[in-house]
Image (spheres, grey):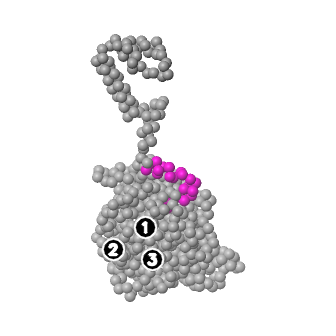
Amino acid sequence: MASDAVKYMPIHSATTTTAAAAEIRSFFSAVKPKKTSTFAYAFVITFVSFTLFFAFSPSPNSSSPWFSNIFSSSSFSSSTTTTAAAPSSSKTASVSSIFSYIIPNVTSTNPTNRSSDAASNTTVPVSVNSTSPSLSSSSVVKNSTLQAPPPENRTPVAKNSTFESPVVNRTEPVAKTNTSQPLLPTGSSNLSRTADKAPSPAKSPPVSVDLTSNSTSSAPSKPGEQTGSVSLLEQEIEKWSESLKDCEFFDGGWIMDDTYPLYKPGSCNIIDEQFNCISNGRPDKDFQKLKWKPKKCSLPRLNGGIMLEMLRGRRLVFVGDSLNRNMWESLVCMLKGSVKDESKVYEASGRHHFRGEAEYSFVFQDYNCTVEFFVSPFLVQENEIVDKKGTKKETLRLDLVGKSSEQYKGADIIVFNTGHWWTHEKTSKGEDYYQEGSNVYHELAVLEAFRKALTTWGRWVEKNVNPDKSLVFFRGYSASHFSGGQWNSGGACDSETEPIKNETYLTPYPDKMKVLERVLKGMRTPVTYLNITRLTDYRKDGHPSVYRKQSLSDKEKKTPLLYQDCSHWCLPGVPDSWNEILYAELLVKLNQLGQTRRNP
């Protein structure tokens, strides 16, 4: 036995064994071979078992990180990529905003804007069937030298009007501008296309958000519902991208759809009395069931929950006259009806009526976003001077943009409009009213004044809007339908219950919108033209007419035709379709950004 122990002893350059080794050999030589084999197997099994236990159940407080490091390094790579992408460089922070929904480091390609009108013979500043409507700082046209300032130079907006980037489990919004949180993950998933029809529910549940691959929800999903708002938004983009990308949204007609309106009449308590026709006693209701249908595609039904995900942490601002207030109230109603807890949707200053003040801001607390309206009917400044006789007189400063511009210039999406106030007597005559610098024109044609005002507005956009961070829209002229006089001379439309069906009765395309198109064509900053003039011209049935208030005064009862409203629109009604077109435009732009990301 002793000789066998020596036989299998390790040999290194004829070195002899130590005394301890000799004693061990003596011990094993004294044990029977069967017992030795059993002991060795037991020792090996015990060692392997303990090793596997510690490997798959690592203590988070282990002093040795070896086990935990093995498994933490195998975390989802998509999560690592997503969280690492946002702070990767200072360039990312300067480029991200609503346009970084899909890509934090997006480099936008040259966009083209949608606009057309069958009655217009002018060159539209945007290509009709655009396939690449993403935003860019690149020049669309020549002749413009103004550059957008760097984002760090932006002036802070007024309190209670905007919020900082969304934070996980955030409950209270904090005033801040220029957020930079992407809404979609950097790695866009390849989703299978679903049937190309509009989502049916008008009231969408709030959906969860996934900003860092650690998904959190603003509201729990029901059993069977898909979780993750990012995937819902991606699916909506994927679902509609092909049918919308070559569609001219403004060439079409009105069709009856019994699933409309998008919100129940009387269900939205923020609609001003002026627009609340059914509550004011209008008996016919078919005007609410008409849907705008482009010839080459179908518009997606506006899904409030998905649009709120587009707006999460963002500011959407409407700037203009009361027709933009019409559109703003319409959108707020659709979005408000899609949240789980409407008590978390409120006007920032606590207002409940939206006429008379210069600005309003609806807060969607669960989404950390605002939908705002700034009154600026001319887009340039209304002014007052004292003439040589010491008399005060009103003027319109064609060379200065509206005073509220400092408050909304950092917004992520801005929808401008103007037009109706340029038809009033004072602006139409243009006598001792239009001003540039200290000069008040004794007489100036309204179209030339309109051109000067829009040029001033365009220069402001060039200087103050960063096209890599903000989307700019300009909503066109909304048609009026006074019969037998104008708004202040007995014009009426109370007998109208159906839209115009014969195109020969439509009015010519407004000269002011031709002026607008020329100004947009001369701008380097891309502006998407929402050319709703023709589609509204059909809708002589959609105005409040005599149903603009619940109770009439004695004077109004005696002469009701003198007080009709044939300019604004009932809600629910025509402005809902404007917002569905805005929704479709955003889907197209997000899809283009996604393609840019996937195909650098």
In which image quadrant can residue 407 be found?
Answer: bottom right
Where does label 1 land, which residue?
Answer: 588
Q: Is residue 438 left or right of residue 48?
A: right
* Residue 282 or residue 216, whichever sits in front: 216
* Residue 5 or residue 224, whichever sits in front: 5
Measured along the vertical axis of the image, is residue 126 above or below residue 197? below
Residue at disc 1, secondary structure: helix
The spot of residue 561 in percent (x, y) is 41, 81
Where does label 3 land, which residue?
Answer: 128
Camera-near label (2 vs 3) is 3
The spot of residue 376 in percent (x, y) is 54, 70
What residue range appears in magenta?
78-100
Q: Is residue 516 visible?
A: no
- Type of amino acid at the residue the image marks with label 3: Val
| Residue drawn 65% across the image and 82% down it | 441
Magenta stretch: residue 49 in it? Answer: no
Mark 3 surroundings within 10 Å by alpha-carbon count, few (fewer than 14), some (14 through 19), many (20 or more): some
Where does label 2 land, which residue?
Answer: 290
Q: Do the residues labelled 3 and 1 touch (CB within 8 Å)?
A: no
Camera-near label (2 vs 1) is 1
Measured along the vertical axis of the image, is residue 316 above or below residue 282? above
* Residue 235 or residue 511, whichever sits in front: 235
- Type of amino acid at the residue the image marks with label 2: Leu
Q: Mostly what secondary structure, the magenta segment?
A: helix
Q: In which quadrant is the N terminus drawn?
A: top left
Magenta stretch: residue 84 in it? Answer: yes
Q: How far apart are marks 3 and 1 (CA)?
A: 13 Å
